[in-house]
Amino acid sequence: MTNITEHLHSAIKSLRFYENKSHRQANTVQLIAVSKTKPISDIEIAIEAGQQHFGENYVQEGIEKVQYFNNPELTWHFIGPIQSNKSKLVAENFDWVHTIDRLKIAKRLSDQRGVYQQPLQVLIQINISGEASKSGIEIDDALILAREINALERLTLRGLMTIGVKTDDNELIKHQFSKMNQLFEQLKKEFDTVDTLSMGMSSDVAHAVEHGSTMVRVGSAIFGTRNT
Ligand SMILES: *Cc1c(COP(=O)(O)O)cnc(C)c1O
């Protein structure tokens, strides 16, 4: 077994462990393998080991991988910032977008999604820490954007995404993740299509699962540390 295979198996195992520990149903949290900056050969190993959901941050690199595999059994998640001039490539190549933070981009993605494709599955990114350097919108602005996105033809609003703060302060992480979970519950009541909370990375999966995450985005714990 290669390292990647081993790491993938242990990531899945700990996910099942945290689900159980948090009294969540088994297999309710989906693992996205974040393969940004990693070569095709690493992704091939993960696919061989049964992984089908992958996350990419950079448009050009991401679509090269999507098109290389050209495999309908794989699901590709765009999890990086989107510039307007790249939105068409994202709309045409990815299955999910986790990082919507303004209506303008949402409209472009809807207009640019192919008419013969399934609607693009989208999440609103929330800046939970309120740090100015972070992308995403404030919690208080989420509901209005959600209503606007919900009205767009070629998008399906699936829920929310956040990036946790990098800190050793567990109480702060828990506080922010629980605020995300509250907003998620509120959104679920208003929108039938909302079922996804994308929260948790290599370092904070346990807290995320405890606070209602349904999708974790794990990179370095599977593929190893990144050079870039
Ligand atoms: C890189 C990245 C991840 C994965 O981070 P790791 O710490 O390597 O698990 C998850 N989500 C986003 C948005 C990322 O940019």
Image: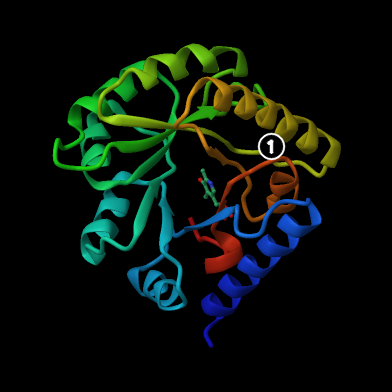
Write the residue at 41% across / 64% down: 52
Q: Say which of 203 and 141 sits in front.
A: 141
> Is 73 left, or right, of 7 in this rendering?
left
The answer to whether residue 133 is visible is no
Residue visible at 50% across and 61% down?
Answer: 227
Residue 73 position within the rendered picture, expressed as x and y whole percent measured from the top left:
31, 63
Of residues 110 and 194, the one nearer the viewer is 194
The residue carrying mark 1 is 165
Q: In the rendered view, tell whether residue 71 sits above or below residue 107.
A: below
- Does residue 125 lie above or below 132 as drawn? below
Tell which of 49 and 220 is nearer to you.
Answer: 49
Q: Please, what secondary structure does the residue beneath circle 1 have?
A: loop
The image quarter containing residue 64 is bottom left
Left or right: where does residue 26 sit relative to residue 34? right
Q: Residues within 10 Å of mark 1 (few under 14, many from 20)?
A: some
x and y, in percent, of residue 148 in the image: 39, 14
Residue ID at (74%, 32%): 178
Residue 77 visible to an observer of this rendering? yes
**Is 32 on the left or on the right of 105, as rendered?**
right
Q: Identify the image quadrant of residue 127.
A: top right
Q: How far from the left and from the top, in percent, is residue 222?
A: 56, 67
Q: Residue at x 58, y 18 (%)?
A: 138
Question: Which amino acid is tagged 1?
Answer: Val
